[in-house]
Amino acid sequence: MTQTQPTDHIDNMLHETRVIEPPADFVARARVSREEYDRRYRQSLDDPDAFWTGVASELTWTQPWSQVLDWQEPHARWFVGGQTNLAYNALDRNVERGLGNKRAFIWEGEDGEVRTYTYAELLGEVKRAANALLDLGVTVGDRVTLYLPLVPEAAIAMLACARIGAVHSVVFGGFSVSALSDRINDASSKLLITADAGQRRGGLVNLKANADEAAKSTPTLEHILVVCRAGCDVEMQPDRDVWWHEALAGAGEEHEAAALDSEHPLFVLYTSGSTGKPKGVLHTTGGYMVGTYLTTGTVFDLREDDIFWCTADVGWITGHSYSVYGPLLNGATTVLYEGAPNHPDWGRFWEVVQKHRVTILYTAPTAIRSFMRQGDAIPAQYDLSSLRLLGSVGEPINPEAWMWYARVIGGGRCPVVDTWWQTETGSIMLTTLPGAHASKPGSAGLPMFGIELAIMTHDGQELGPDDGGLLVIKRPWPSMLRTVYGDDERYRKTYWGEIPHVYFAGDGARRDADGYVTVVGRVDDVLNVSGHRLGTMEIESALVAHPSVAEAAVVGRPDEVKGECVVAFVLPQGGQTVEPHELRAYVTREIGALARPDAIIIADALPKTRSGKIMRRFLRQIAAGQPIQGDTSTLEDPSVLERLAETPAV
Ligand code: PRX
């Protein structure tokens, strides 16, 4: 079993020199060769209109666009004047081209139940769901919040919204009542779709009870549509609550997909930023469709008989783009698995791969590191020979985990693609193409078609090979976010205001002489815990809302499995005692279990400058158990650092 030291991750990535060529037989059959990548990448930058016209024309539009891009910095409109429907392209189009009997989804519940949907069946369900939404008064442009476990109904509901032009906002089922109500209110949603309960590690997550609680403070909600997942006896409020199965049974079978403007809003997805409350990232129809269609097909070298499994929950962007929209647009067969990777044991993922003959697996480094810790013997008990390609996403992958994934899961025959992108980018931005490029473990690789990036200093100077700086994107791309829902000023400031005329990703990176980009992590106050984005300010606000806390500062600490974990420095309210378990429970209640601090340090003061600014740099060093480095003379009281370093975490 290989193990990494926690603080070695980034250091290892910067000193990694291994180059791994893709297997010859993979190269021989690849959809995109090296020459093809070079040619198409060049065309995508030199003649973007021709390039994007070519890709978008592979899909169906009810009205052609008159202009490929209208760029009024920082606002882009793609395929201007065009009309289309994403659900039509994901379903009807595939049925029309003869894929009606092909499996679209293979769903497996945590309890082992399996359900499959052919393209024709899925289309039938989505049409009924679309009619059910219309029956409940949802119309084009209305917002619908989804708070569901990973059941087929989650994807069906997303597609039904896309079909009628309602804007979905999926809230991960692990989020708390207040996180849910904040998101419903921010989007002014009319409808909430939830389930009686979700299954997680053998237990139940009472989603309907949370939804009821949230609905007490969400005045715009008119109805709650409830999927019966666990057969629980839940309270249904007459006039407001409707069972999903009853609504669909009563809904018409026929539905024609709405012709929507290319820039019609498709979904809002909330993600954490460095300041304030989570941002509602807004994606629109045409560009997002083209971006996810193109990247799923090329990055995953998709072919007719593939069984594609992206392990992300639909509550995250990866689930949106690569569990639902991208694979369906390509007519692929996708696996959806509801549960945890370690239920009933650490062999569960491999059992799913074996049972459904998964050919392409796309998962997160944190999961890979957890499996690695369990040793090689567990995956060795399963037949993983169906796999031909592996993908990684969500956070930097350390070379040891990359090598383990390739060797133990990929059996040495599967290329590994490390894909860098964000909720905001909508689709994959940086990767190697599996049959075109060699991999450098730890380095995501090269830009996708149409993506022009640079590494810059804060003042906009472009840096050369091997210099570390900020990752920026120099021109708009189709699947980019269009704004922050309801807060365009925040959109301008966060993404286009840091460095003039470029998109600021919030990540630090460097590029080597071959053009491979290594993304090392966030440069802002955003943590990446097990591939999930969390704002330090969000957690701090939750902590200071507790009556016994006067002040709090949250930083990340490198973690062997999670990538980063949450460390909270907490200053108690005069004379009060702070109970760590109570604070953890409080953060779980305010945000969700994913934000629960791993370590709490009860402090008598925080390191502040004379003007009152908390110096997080020092807190990060203390949290990681490192010696204090840097100029401490600006601190009002430098002795605070020593005291904090000596205080044990609880
Ligand atoms: O810091 C980068 C990291 O995850 C952030 C985006 O998080 P989110 O919007 O939740 O989307 C995650 C899934 C697309 C990025 O700013 N990140 C994502 N993928 C990688 C990565 N860091 C390094 N390498 C990656 N492959």
Image: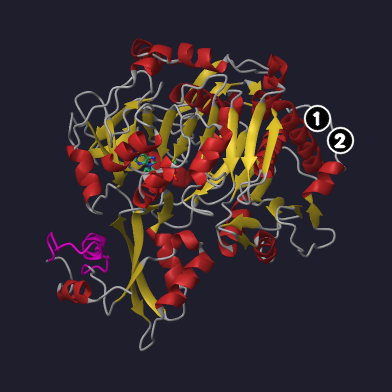
Regarding residue 486, the answer to whether it shows in the image is: yes
Q: Which residue is mark 2?
A: 252
Residue 365, position as x, y percentages in the image: 38, 44
Q: For the point 66% across and 22% down, which residue is it?
A: 83
Residue 638 lies, with reference to residue 29, above or below; the image says below
Regarding residue 503, the answer to whether it shows in the image is: no
At label 1, the amino acid type is His
Q: CA distance from mark 2 to mark 1?
A: 8 Å
Q: Which residue is mark 1?
A: 255
Residue 129 lies, with reference to residue 39, above or below; the image says below
Closest to the observer, 611 or 607: 607
- Quadrant into which the C terminus falls: bottom left
Image side of residue 182 versus residue 491, left or right: right
Query: Which residue range is magenta in the image?
Result: 609-632
Residue 339, position as x, y percentages in the image: 56, 50
Residue 582, position as x, y percentages in the image: 46, 77
Whether the magenta-drawn stretch holds residue 473 is answered as: no
Q: Quadrant of ligand 1?
A: top left
Q: Which mark is residue 176?
A: none
Q: For the point 28% across and 34% down, which residue is it?
A: 441
Residue 528, position as x, y percentages in the image: 38, 51
Tell me, yes or no, whether the two marked residues, 2 and 1, touch with CB atoms within 8 Å.
Answer: yes
Query: Dot 1 surroundings within 10 Å: few (below 14), some, or many (20 or more)?
Result: some
Find residue 355 and report its image quarter: top right
Closest to the observer, 13 or 492: 13
Q: For the point 27% across and 66% down, which residue is it?
A: 614
Whether the magenta-drawn stretch holds residue 621 is answered as: yes
